[in-house]
Amino acid sequence: MLEAKTLSISIPRPWQDLYEAIWRPEFFPKWASGLSSSALTWDGEQWRAQGPEGPIRIRFSAHNPYGIMDHTVDTGMGEPVYVPMRVLANGDGAEVMLTIFCQPAMTAEKFEADLQWVEGDLQALKALTIAG
């Protein structure tokens, strides 16, 4: 088993409204700098983008009524990385939860850096969704 950490952020919007605003793959580059530094393009089978360390291929879960926004990132180096993500009801607002797995051969320092990066991305998502 891999070490895992789940990060979450509370956003003062109804969860279904928030999910509808952010579920589309094209929305991810607006806040998820750890995923992509460029627009995503669809090649007919999967999404492609420029990730922080080079080209990546991404598969996203389909739109659904449960707030599931899982995605799998393939860097072409090793196994694709599964990223579970959920938008949940939290009273009148929403909780966005994202789990990061420490990948094989990843140092503790790199894992901690990734966690901090994702925390920043979640803050960016909150700022973007409150403003919009």
Image: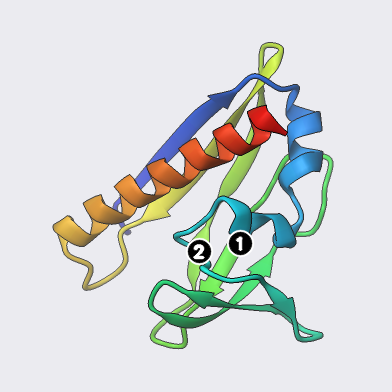
| Residue annotated with mark 2 | 35
Residue 24 picture location, percent across and down: 76, 55
Q: Quadrant of residue 5 in the image?
A: top left
Q: Are marks 2 and 1 in contact (CB under 8 Å)?
A: yes
Q: Mark 2 belongs to which amino acid?
A: Leu
Circle 1 residues within 10 Å: few <14, some 14–19, many ≥20: some
**Relative to 77, is 102 on the left or the right?**
left
Q: Mark 1 belongs to which amino acid?
A: His
Q: Quadrant of residue 87 in the image?
A: top right
| Mark with earlier residue (2, 1) | 2
Q: Is residue 69 above or below residue 89?
A: below
Residue furthest top as drawn: 91
Residue 84 picture location, percent across and down: 55, 52
**Relative to 19, is 83 on the left or the right?**
left
Give the structural element (helix, strand or loop) at label 1: strand
Tell me the quadrant of the picture where the N terminus can be found: bottom left
- Residue 41 visible, this angle: yes
| Residue annotated with mark 1 | 71
Residue 10 picture location, percent across and down: 55, 24
Q: Residue at x 60, y 60 (%)?
A: 29
Q: Residue at x 25, y 54 (%)?
A: 113
How far is mark 2 from mark 1, CA to CA? 10 Å
**Relative to 117, is 33 on the left or the right?**
right
Q: Residue at x 39, y 84 (%)?
A: 78
* Nearest to the observer: residue 53 or residue 97: 53
Residue furthest front as drawn: 131
Residue 111 picture location, percent across and down: 25, 56
